[in-house]
Image (spheres, helix red, strand yellow):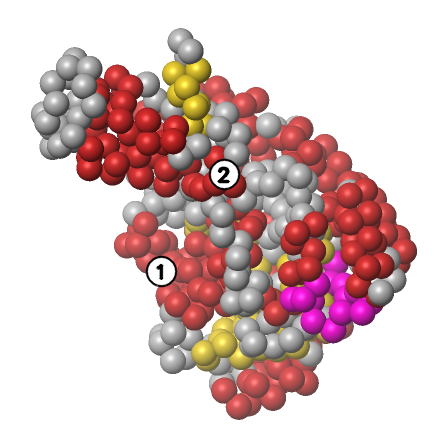
């Protein structure tokens, strides 16, 4: 709607236009609070905002005066209006208040994963340090992506996903012992969309699904949204508790068991070969389909035990992703399964999302085909092994108990002296700018107390982590 309450060049403070100006000021204030504009950012000019919203220029002037009075923006002579350095604190005075007391739940931790706090130690982070991935910079491959069929980038891709990438994945899966054809692969918008498709296809509201406990917390939220009843299978240092698993199979007769064989999130444990074979025997006996999520495949040796390699996709659906080894921003994942199931899942994907991002898939394919990729994997594994050993030394020095001591894992499952509830530890450390991931977030029972915390080895090796945690534990010990 045009704002014609005041002539554009009258120079007088508008009166009838003031409510409109207040609304614009509130809009910009919310954008500052939500991080759309950060401290030091320049706001659009008066003319740009007037044209965008079809307001008179004086209305925009009044909106800026309101923002200046609130301390959110400040004028710079001849340069425009800029967000003040303390605007974030003014706009979000109580953002964190009460978050931990209301459970430090799944959504809270997901928000923390997506936030950037330069001065905070993200001890509970789910991603490797950015420096570990920097040698696979996407700008190096940009021109090659656009040269691989620019015309196709203006249309939807195949329901299965970009075929050359699926062919590259056939070779990649072959390296870890999984034999698959391109028709057995469906590309997805990250591994999380892959889980969504599997849940939608197999599980109706009220159905029972088994899953690792502790386990991958976003999966809990997905199953809850689908109305699926979750039953946890205790995770031990060498994999799932098979006696507990069989008892639940007999009791509930579920269709699916969601698990992570390698670099388990959050415990960092790996499935032992003996337990892998017994798990597949149970799946055969009870007509169970296993959904094996392997997001850290690139960090583990190709010889590591994977259920999909032992089963060859008969009773195992294998999920993978490039978020941890390339970039989470690419959002490229995949499902490997039987041919008929892959076709059904591709149809379901087309119905829900039409297609995945062929542009991102072309980018990943170019990166995989580069000789640099093999060197990148060697460096990743070396960095992870060194960081794991260093992190274990740090935790030992802090008196922490570690659930299992892998030779390399992005995550370690730890408990700290003097704290039987890791939620209380996380709450106490937040003012010290250490962001923990307490164990109850990873529990199938959201009300369960847990002394354990997931710790990222890349964060543990930061000197600030040792210093801040040691100081806090000393004060807590009294």
What residue is shown at x 55% (from left), y 28% (from top)?
138
Q: Which one is closest to the eye, mark 1 or mark 2?
A: 2
Point out which mark residue 88 bears: 2
| Residue 2 position by quadrant | top left
Query: Where residue 463 sits: x, y (%)?
Result: 81, 42
Determine if the magenta segment contains residue 232.
no
Up the image or down, 193 lies above or below 214; here it is: above
Tell me where the magenta segment starts and ends, as one range.
Answer: 411-425
Nearest to the observer: residue 95 or residue 243:
95
Nearest to the observer: residue 73 or residue 312:
73
Determine if the magenta segment contains residue 412.
yes
User: Which residue is outermost to the top?
Assistant: 78
Could one spot residue 363 in this view of the protein? no
Quarter of the image with the N terminus in it: top left
Up the image or down, 214 lies above or below 142; here it is: below
Q: CA distance from mark 1 to mark 2?
A: 47 Å
For label 2, the SS is helix
What residue is shown at x 66% (from left), y 29% (from top)?
135
Up the image or down, 363 lies above or below 158; here it is: above
| Residue 222 position by quadrant | bottom left
Graded by Cα atoms within 10 Å as few (under 14), some (14 to 19) or many (20 or more), the crowding at tag 2 reads some
438 relative position to 342: left or right: right
Up the image or down, 445 lies above or below 7; here it is: below
Please give the residue where the numbered disc 1 appears in the rendered image. Answer: 344
254 relative position to 431: left or right: left
Quarter of the image with the C terminus in it: bottom right
Query: Where residue 11 sits: x, y (%)?
Result: 19, 15
Nearest to the observer: residue 227 or residue 102:
102
Query: Where residue 95 sits: x, y (%)?
Result: 49, 51
Query: Where residue 35 sits: x, y (%)?
Result: 45, 38
Nearest to the observer: residue 471 or residue 302:
471
């Amino acid at each position: 709607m045009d704002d014609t309450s005041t002539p554009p060049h009258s120079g007088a403070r508008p009166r009838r236009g003031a409510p409109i100006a207040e609304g614009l000021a509130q809009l910009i204030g919310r954008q500052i609070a939500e991080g759309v504009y950060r401290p030091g950012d320049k706001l659009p000019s008066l003319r740009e905002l007037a044209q965008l919203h079809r307001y008179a220029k004086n209305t925009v002037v009044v909106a800026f005066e309101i923002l200046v009075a609130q301390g959110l923006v400040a004028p710079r002579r001849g340069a425009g209006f800029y967000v003040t350095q303390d605007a974030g604190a003014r706009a979000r005075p109580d953002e964190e208040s009460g978050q931990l007391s209301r459970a430090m739940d799944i959504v809270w931790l997901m928000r923390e994963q997506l936030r950037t706090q330069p001065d905070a130690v993200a001890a509970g982070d789910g991603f490797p340090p950015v420096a570990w991935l920097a040698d696979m910079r996407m700008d190096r491959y940009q021109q090659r992506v656009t040269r691989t069929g620019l015309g196709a980038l203006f249309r939807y891709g195949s329901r299965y996903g970009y075929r050359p990438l699926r062919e590259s994945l056939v070779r990649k899966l072959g390296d870890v012992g999984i034999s698959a054809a391109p028709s057995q692969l469906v590309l997805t918008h990250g591994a999380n969309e892959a889980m969504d498709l599997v849940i939608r296809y197999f599980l109706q509201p009220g159905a029972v699904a088994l899953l690792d406990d502790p386990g991958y917390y976003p999966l809990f939220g997905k199953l809850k949204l689908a109305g699926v009843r979750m039953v946890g299978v205790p995770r031990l240092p060498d994999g799932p508790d098979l006696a507990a698993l069989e008892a639940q199979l007999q009791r509930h007769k579920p269709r699916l068991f969601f698990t992570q064989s390698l670099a388990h999130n959050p415990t960092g444990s790996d499935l032992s070969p003996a337990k892998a074979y017994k798990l597949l025997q149970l799946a055969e006996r009870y007509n169970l389909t296993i959904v094996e999520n392997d997001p850290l495949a690139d960090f583990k040796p190709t010889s590591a035990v994977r259920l999909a390699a032992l089963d060859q996709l008969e009773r195992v659906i294998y999920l993978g992703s490039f978020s941890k080894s390339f970039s989470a921003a690419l959002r490229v994942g995949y499902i490997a399964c039987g041919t008929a199931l892959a076709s059904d899942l591709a149809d379901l994907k087309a119905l829900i999302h039409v297609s995945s991002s062929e542009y991102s898939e072309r980018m990943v394919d170019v990166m995989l085909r580069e000789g640099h990729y093999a060197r990148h994997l060697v460096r990743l594994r070396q960095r992870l092994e060194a960081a794991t050993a260093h992190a274990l030394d740090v935790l030992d020095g802090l008196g922490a108990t570690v659930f299992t001591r892998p030779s390399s894992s992005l995550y370690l499952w730890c408990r700290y002296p003097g704290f039987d509830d890791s939620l209380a530890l996380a709450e106490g450390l937040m003012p010290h700018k250490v962001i923990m991931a307490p164990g109850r977030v990873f529990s199938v029972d959201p009300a369960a107390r847990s002394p354990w915390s997931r710790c990222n080895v890349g964060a543990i090796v930061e000197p600030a982590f040792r210093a801040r945690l040691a100081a806090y534990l000393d004060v807590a010990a009294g």
